């Protein structure tokens, strides 16, 4: 695993994806991100390591444009600007993350065995919570009006 930290672009595959986005024309970047997310989200059998790594990077880019999100890694992610990504990518990104952490994911298996795997899972949860915030428990109604 060519990984140097837990961040979405802190591995060789994701860093290469960032370079590929930089090399693509501006009007093709959204389609590249959408394709990476769809490939991960639609995996029903097995999600291999490179697809999982690219998916996490793509999710970070989508989350980075959310009002509650943080910009994706500036050092290893794309250095060229991205177009404004449509909101319909958010549920696709959540579905992709759900596959990334599933038992059918090589990436999840690899991080389960890593010393800082719990930090990686926390980072994945943070990304997911930006895109699909957990709902607060409903307050119990004390009386009907």
Image (spheres, grey):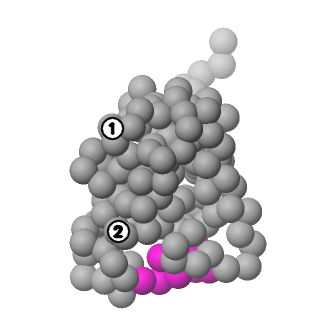
Q: Going 31% across and 59% down the picture, which residue do you hit?
A: 7
Q: In this rendering, does residue 18 appear at all?
A: yes
Q: Residue at x 47, y 34 (%)?
A: 82
- List x then y, in percent, for residue 91: 64, 43
Q: Residue at x 31, y 63 (%)?
A: 10
- Looking at the picture, how far across and down is residue 118, in whole percent? 31, 71
Q: Position of residue 88 (x, y in %)?
A: 67, 35
Name the disc covering residue 131, or none: none
Q: Read off the residue under disc 2.
A: 11
Q: Marks 2 and 1: CB-CB under 8 Å? A: no
Q: How many C-alpha atoms fall within 10 Å of the one at disc 1: few (<14), some, or many (≥20)?
A: some
94 or 4, which lies in front? 4
Label 1 element class: loop
Q: 30 and 40: which one is in front?
A: 30
Which numbered circle lies on residue 70? Answer: 1
Query: Magenta stretch: residue 102 in it?
Result: yes
In the rendered picture of this protein, how many numbered marks are placed on residues?
A: 2
Q: Which residues are magenta?
A: 101-110
């Amino acid at each position: 695993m060519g990984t140097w930290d837990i961040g979405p672009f802190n591995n060789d595959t994701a860093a290469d994806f960032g370079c590929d986005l930089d090399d693509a024309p501006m009007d093709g970047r959204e389609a590249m991100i959408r394709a990476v997310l769809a490939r991960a989200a639609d995996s029903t059998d097995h999600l291999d390591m490179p697809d999982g790594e690219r998916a996490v990077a793509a999710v970070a880019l989508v989350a980075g444009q959310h009002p509650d999100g943080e910009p994706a890694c500036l050092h290893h992610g794309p250095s060229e600007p991205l177009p404004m990504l449509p909101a319909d990518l958010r549920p696709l990104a959540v579905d992709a993350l759900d596959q990334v952490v599933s038992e059918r994911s090589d990436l999840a298996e690899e991080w389960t065995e890593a010393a800082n795997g719990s930090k990686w899972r926390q980072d994945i949860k943070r990304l997911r919570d930006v895109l699909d915030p957990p709902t607060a428990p409903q307050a119990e109604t004390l009386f009907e009006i």
